[in-house]
Structures are given as structure tokens and as C-alpha cells.
Image: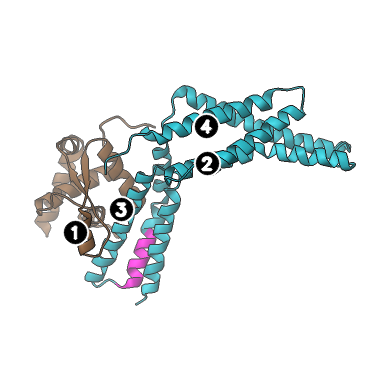
Chain colours: A cyan, B brown
């Protein structure tokens, strides 16, 4: 009889619960994890009482966790759309526009870099190399901003300070603004930057003031 | 495709049927694992309902008003050295939804199962 297999199955299931609840409000996350922990305990206890082997209980537990993964992911996405993280239609439109502009900035930066290397006007001499590095940094700006947004969601869900995550957003948006300024003929970058910062500061405020769910 | 409001899908019918059977056995409240075990027994399944399917359905049914839940007193769980249980109970609305959706088939099935056992 292997209690190691049972321990591993339990750890796997709890680890998966820890993963798919990431980014959700603290109490929703805690409740789901506690409910899974209770279920695991009951299954092991009941299986043991009925004479089921530890290996069989472990296999059963593992199977339940794996087969439920699609539903867990769907649940996570549903909770993200829930009342406490609900965006209005206009907010969703703004987010959509920012994401599209961010992706467009990345594509534009990558194409510009390829063109610069191909045509020999980038990384040709020290000055151009500096410009090239600057271009790469600015192109990565939206990615940094997106990472910051994710970090904010995690921090809010875990009840931690969002200062560091917000700093990441600011760094990312400054990179985007820099790309816009470097390409002096356009104001797209700075507009995206200001928009993203304004939007997320507002959104973070909403998450924080969301009504707590009764336990 | 979005389903019509108030209609039940198979897993929800199974859950409500499990509550009815548990109620007949004297269990008004049931935690997730007990519900999964009851479904397995009543349907003769080889496996328990997966965690994801079960708890997603329970949460959805609570939001729909068909079930209500409460957490066990943490002192009781601590005394028994186990995690706290979340107990669910079927509401009147749940009973009505179940009756409207599937009472004839499920009742017939449960009756025939009891008659043969």
C-alpha cells in the first residue's frame, strides 16, 4: 500500500487548485481551495474505511482532478466575469482597444526592427545600436504592461499591496510612450500610455471596493 | 449555445436527485464529497464526479437559488482534525426546478432500483 501515491495525488490536486484559482478574489480562492481540501480528506477517509487501497484512492483522486480540469478553467473564466470583476460594455471596449493598440505596437516595433536590421540602418554603428536597443525596449513595453496588469490581478486577489505591480505597468507604459515619442510623427504611444495608466488605476480601485461575499 | 433559464442540465439533475435520496436517508445537508458519492451510487458509475464538474455545478446552482450553502463551524472541524466542510442544502426552488425538469424519469428510475434491490 503506497501512501506516497496518495500524498502525491493530493498534492497534485491542491497544486492545481492553487493554479486555477490564481487571479480571483481572495475569498473565492480560499473557499474553493478549502472545499477541495475537504473533498480530498473525505475521499481518503471514506476510501480507507471501505478498505480501498491507497493506490486506488490516489488513482481515483488524480482522475477526478484531471477530468475536472476543463470545468475548472471554465469556472475560473466565469468568476473573472463575475460581479466583483465585472466590467461595463464601455470599459470592455476601452480594454479591447488598448489591447489591440498594444499588440499593434509590438508588431510595429518588431517589423521596424527587422526592417532596420535588413536595410542596415539599425545596429550599424554604436549610435544606431543604442537606437536599436531602445526600439526593442519600447517594443517590449506592452508586454511589460500586460505582465503588470496580471501582477495587479494576483496582488488584489491575494490581498497584497499592488504598488509593485502598478510600478510594472508604469514602466511598460513609459516604454510605449517612448516608442511614440521616438517615432516623433505619432502621438499613438503616449495616448496608449496615458489611457492604460488611467484605466488600470480606476480598475484597481473598483476591485478593492468590491463587495465581499458572505462566507 | 446558451441554455434556457431555469432548465437543468444532466449533472444538475443528478445533484438534485442525490439530494432527494440523501433526504430520504435523513441527510438534509451534504458536503461535496457526499454528493459525489451519492451520485456514483445512484447512477452505478465507476468513478466519482470530477472535482471541477461537481464544484462548478454546485456554485452555479447556488447562484441560481436551487441550493444554499453554509460552512461548518471551524471548531468542529478542528476537533476532528480535518478540513472544514461546506454543507449544501436543496431549496424549495431547487425542488420545483427538479420536479419540472425530470421528476418522472428520475422517480421511475429510483423506484425501479429500490424494487430490484
Query: Which chain is mark 4 on?
Result: A
The chain identifier of the residue carrying mark 2 reads A
Q: Left of B114 or right of it: where is A197?
A: right
Foreground mark, 1 or 3, reads: 1
- Residue shown at 68%/27% (left/top)? A189
**Are labels 2 and 3 on one chain?**
yes
Residue B51 x %, y %? 34, 53
**Image quarter hosting the C terminus of chain A:** top left
Camera-side residue of A138 and B85: A138
Gap in Å between the C-alphas at discs 1 and 3? 16 Å
Residue indicated by mark 2 = A163
CA–CA distance in space, label 1 to label 4: 43 Å
Q: Please check whether the numbered discs 1 and 3 fall on a single chain.
A: no
Query: Closer to us: mark 2 or mark 1?
Result: 2
**Pointer 4 residue:** A200
For disc 1, the marked residue is: B76
Do marks 3 and 4 share a subunit? yes
Q: Main secondary structure of the magenta part?
A: helix
Magenta-drawn segment: A53-63
Q: Which mark is residue A35?
A: 3
Disc 4, SS? helix
Whole-number angstrom distance, CA of label 2 to CA of label 4: 12 Å
Circle 2 sits in a helix, a strand or a loop, which is it?
Answer: helix
Q: Residue at x 36, y 71 (%)?
A: A55
Q: CA distance from mark 2 to mark 3?
A: 31 Å
Amino acid at each position: 500500500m503506497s501512501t506516497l501515491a496518495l500524498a502525491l495525488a493530493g498534492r497534485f490536486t491542491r497544486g492545481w487548485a492553487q493554479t486555477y484559482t490564481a487571479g480571483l478574489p481572495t475569498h473565492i480562492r480560499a473557499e474553493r481551495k478549502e472545499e477541495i481540501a475537504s473533498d480530498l480528506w473525505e475521499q481518503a477517509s471514506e476510501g480507507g474505511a471501505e478498505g480501498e487501497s491507497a493506490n486506488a484512492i490516489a488513482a481515483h483522486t488524480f482522475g477526478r482532478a484531471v477530468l475536472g480540469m476543463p470545468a475548472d478553467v471554465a469556472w475560473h473564466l466565469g468568476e473573472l466575469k463575475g460581479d466583483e470583476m465585472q466590467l461595463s460594455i464601455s470599459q470592455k471596449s476601452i480594454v479591447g482597444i488598448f489591447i489591440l493598440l498594444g499588440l499593434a505596437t509590438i508588431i510595429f516595433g518588431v517589423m521596424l526592427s527587422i526592417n532596420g536590421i535588413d536595410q542596415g540602418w539599425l545596429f550599424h554603428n554604436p549610435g544606431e545600436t543604442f537606437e536599436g536597443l531602445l526600439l526593442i525596449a519600447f517594443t517590449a513595453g506592452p508586454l511589460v504592461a500586460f505582465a503588470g496588469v496580471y501582477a495587479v490581478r494576483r496582488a488584489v486577489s491575494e490581498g497584497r499591496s499592488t504598488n509593485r505591480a502598478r510600478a510594472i505597468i508604469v514602466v511598460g507604459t513609459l516604454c510605449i510612450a517612448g516608442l511614440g515619442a521616438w517615432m516623433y510623427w505619432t502621438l499613438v504611444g503616449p495616448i496608449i500610455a496615458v489611457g492604460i495608466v488611467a484605466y488600470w488605476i480606476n480598475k484597481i480601485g473598483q476591485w478593492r471596493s468590491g463587495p465581499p461575499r458572505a462566507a | 449555445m446558451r441554455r434556457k433559464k431555469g432548465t437543468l442540465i444532466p449533472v444538475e439533475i443528478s445533484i438534485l436527485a442525490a439530494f432527494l435520496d440523501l433526504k430520504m436517508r435523513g441527510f438534509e445537508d451534504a458536503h461535496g464529497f457526499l454528493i459525489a458519492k451519492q451520485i456514483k451510487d445512484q447512477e452505478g458509475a465507476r468513478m466519482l464526479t470530477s472535482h471541477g464538474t461537481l464544484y462548478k455545478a454546485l456554485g452555479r446552482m447556488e447562484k441560481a437559488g436551487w441550493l444554499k450553502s453554509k460552512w461548518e463551524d471551524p471548531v468542529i472541524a478542528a476537533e476532528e482534525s480535518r478540513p472544514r466542510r461546506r454543507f449544501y442544502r436543496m431549496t424549495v426552488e431547487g425542488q420545483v426546478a427538479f420536479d419540472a425538469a425530470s421528476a418522472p424519469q428520475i422517480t421511475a428510475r429510483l423506484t425501479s432500483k429500490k424494487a430490484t434491490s
